[in-house]
Image (cartoon, rainbow, N blue to C red):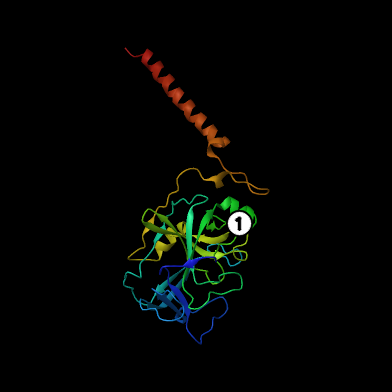
Amino acid sequence: LAGQSAEIWQPCLWWFPHQQRMGDVCCSLLLQISLGRQNLQGENPNEVSRTVNKIILHPSYDSDTSDNDIALLRLSSPVQFTDYIRPVCLAASDSVFNNGTDSWITGWGAVQEGVWLPSPETLQEVEVPVVGNRQCNCLNGIGRITDNMICAGVLAGGKDSCQGDSGGPMVNQQGSVWVQSGVVSFGFGCARPNLPGVYARVSRYQTWINSHIISDKPGFVQFTSSGLDADSSYTCPGLPPPFHPQHHPLLLLLLLLLLLQQLLQVSVTHISNLFTF
């Protein structure tokens, strides 16, 4: 929402014509993936299509909370990379996205609530900052945002993903490398003030993704954010206090015990020296 025309970036997922989705479970044979497609209508000379052989849902997906809202699609045959079809790097498990990190979202979804993308339905992109999980929890409802999620949006409103963008990528640039940090999951309306969009956090799924890919594993890249994360000290009524390891009583006790151990070792060494002839 409030985006601009984008370069070809993401695949498009289609239902075959004259087929129906059956409840919450879909048959993979009804799905087609289009890569290198920029417009939903008209010609797309760089497009390549494949059917889907298998859908791998995350085993811990929760339809009530949208936790672990991620799946893998196995294509019917390999795809050759071109100038218009290239893979994105994925955020590695130790990636850090501080509050305010610039992000880009792409999709063919609605341009505002209830208003769909006009013909020829060209792929759109919008830039939004990361909103830290603590702040996002305060804005979306305490306990709603889990560690498996990442949020992004303009707090003043006006820019966001929207209906029809679900499953699309949220990416971040690190030098010359683009890294996918999120997958469009859910939100309350579109681009409403103080209601950032919520995305599945890709970095939480490195082990799970690799466990289902035997060869040609995706490239995982550690994304780093410089400086302190303002979200680490964000608080609101009902939110558990931020964890500061340097102030944690158990950690302080451990440090004191280690210091005492070192002092005792020094004392024992000095005493043994007194009896050395």
Q: Quadrant of the N terminus?
A: bottom right
Give the mark count: 1
Q: Which residue of the protein is positioned furthest toward the bottom in this rendering?
A: 18
Q: Residue at x 48, y 66 (%)?
A: 4
Going by the numbered disc 1, the residue's amino acid type is Ala
Q: Is residue 124 visible?
A: yes
In the displayed structure image, the side of residue 112 where residue 123 appears, left or right: left
- Front position in the image: 110 or 251: 110
- Front position in the image: 196 or 266: 196
- Front position in the image: 126 or 212: 126
Q: Quadrant of residue 82?
A: bottom left
Mark 1 neighbour class, 10 Å CA radius: few under 14, some 14 to 19, many 20 or more: few
Relative image position of residue 181 (x, y in whole percent): 46, 58
Q: Residue at x 63, y 59 (%)?
A: 193
Q: Residue at x 58, y 67 (%)?
A: 63
In the displayed structure image, the side of residue 240 where residue 275 appears, left or right: left
Under tag 1, what secondary structure?
loop
Relative image position of residue 26 (x, y in whole percent): 51, 78
Above or below residue 71? Residue 153 is above
Q: Which residue is mark 1?
A: 156
Q: Quadrant of the C terminus?
A: top left
Q: Residue at x 46, y 27 (%)?
A: 261
Relative image position of residue 255 (x, y in whole percent): 50, 32
Q: Is residue 61 visible?
A: no
Relative image position of residue 59 (x, y in whole percent): 51, 66
